[in-house]
Image (cartoon, helix red, strand yellow):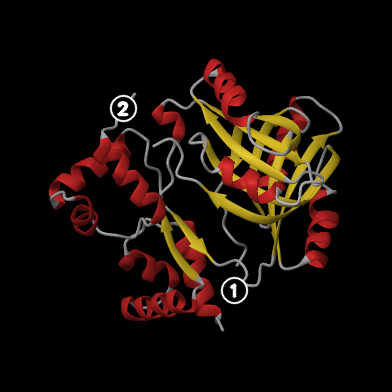
Amino acid sequence: MLDDVDRRILRQYQAAPELPAADLAQRAGVTASTLARRLQRMQGLGVLRGLRAQVHWPALGYELEVSLRITLDKTQARAFDEFLAAARNVPEVIEIQTFLGVVDARLSVIARDLAHYQQVYRQRILTLPHIADIEALMHVATLKSDEALPL
Amino acid sequence: MIDLDQTDRALLRVLTEDASQSAGALGRQLGLSQPATWRRLRRLREAGVLGAPRLVLDHGALGFGVSVFLGVKLATKGRVSLEDFERAVTAIPEVQTVEHVLGLYDYRLRVVARDIPDFERVLRRRIMTLPGVGNVEANVLLSEERRPGPI
């Protein structure tokens, strides 16, 4: 489906998504028209889904990020669906993941400071349905976050 | 810290879904002129709220069928081993994100692989051989949602 030229374009594109098309074409070693054609084709195939802006929360005063690892009460048939639906309604939840493994779900929660975190945790998180257990990991630093694929 | 009005918030929401649009197209959606949109974008960038966009790729279509989150505990602690571990782990191409956390684990890694046997290869050859690595917990990602957050 994809050849080496496509992969080269994607490799350069994911490394610098903000680059103007002309510079991207040069880095990938293709002409501007080849680049446009290839990108359009990959969009059509659904490989390339788009560009998303990243909000840097500390710049908006959200200094704290906590990973909450959650075990659900699986004796309840609709535990996953009801938990996820309720978690979507908490504005401070910026990521929701589900897993096969030791924990069932993980929420990334942001807060302005510890007092605000405590308020969100008590009023919005502990009240989510079907939670059997919660473990918290406090985020200290991000060392790598590009989420690039090894193409 | 920057104050956001309703228009800034709307702009951020649109951009976290689709950052590929021109200032003109964004402005038309929000009822702003192109220069006004451009000024707001510049202000958000300068305040550090809006980071570089990220390319969204279909992992499955590119042959990456599994994402696994690893909780890693270091066996030996101390300044030297932390630095050695961090340098080695961020250099692994299959490791997409590395976060330093406080709690049950010391680091949280996001690892991408073609399939479960490929993941096992990465785990055995790359992760378990890292300097200072101790207990490792793995959770296979089933679903993931990025939420707009409190904007």
The label number, if any, that marks residue B2 in the structure image: 2
Q: Is residue A15 left or right of residue A53?
A: right
Marked residue chain, label 2: B
Is residue A35 shown above or below A63?
below
Out of B115 and B75, give the one closest to the viewer. B115
Give the residue pinned by disc 1: B61
| Image point (25%, 59%), residue name | B22
In this rendering, would B60 be left or right of B74?
left
Q: Could you tell me which chain the residue with mark 1 belongs to?
A: B
Q: Looking at the picture, which amino acid does disc 1 mark?
A: Ala
Relative height, residue A66 to residue B121 (above, below):
above
Query: How many numbered markers are drawn?
Result: 2
Q: Quadrant of the C terminus of chain B?
A: top left
Q: x%, y% of residue A18?
A: 37, 55
Residue B29 image-quadrant placement: bottom left
The label shown at residue A97 is none
Whole-angstrom CA distance, mark 1 to mark 2, is 40 Å
Q: Give the residue drawn at x 37%, y 36%.
A: B49
- Give the residue at x 72% y 39%: A130
Left-right relation of B13 to B82: left
Q: Is residue B5 left or right of residue A150?
A: left
What residue sits 86% from the left and 33% below the top? B75
Q: Quadrant of the N terminus of chain B?
A: top left
**Residue B122 shows up from this direction:** yes
- Residue B121 location (% of width, % of height): 82, 62
Using the rendered view, name the quadrant where residue B109 is placed: top right
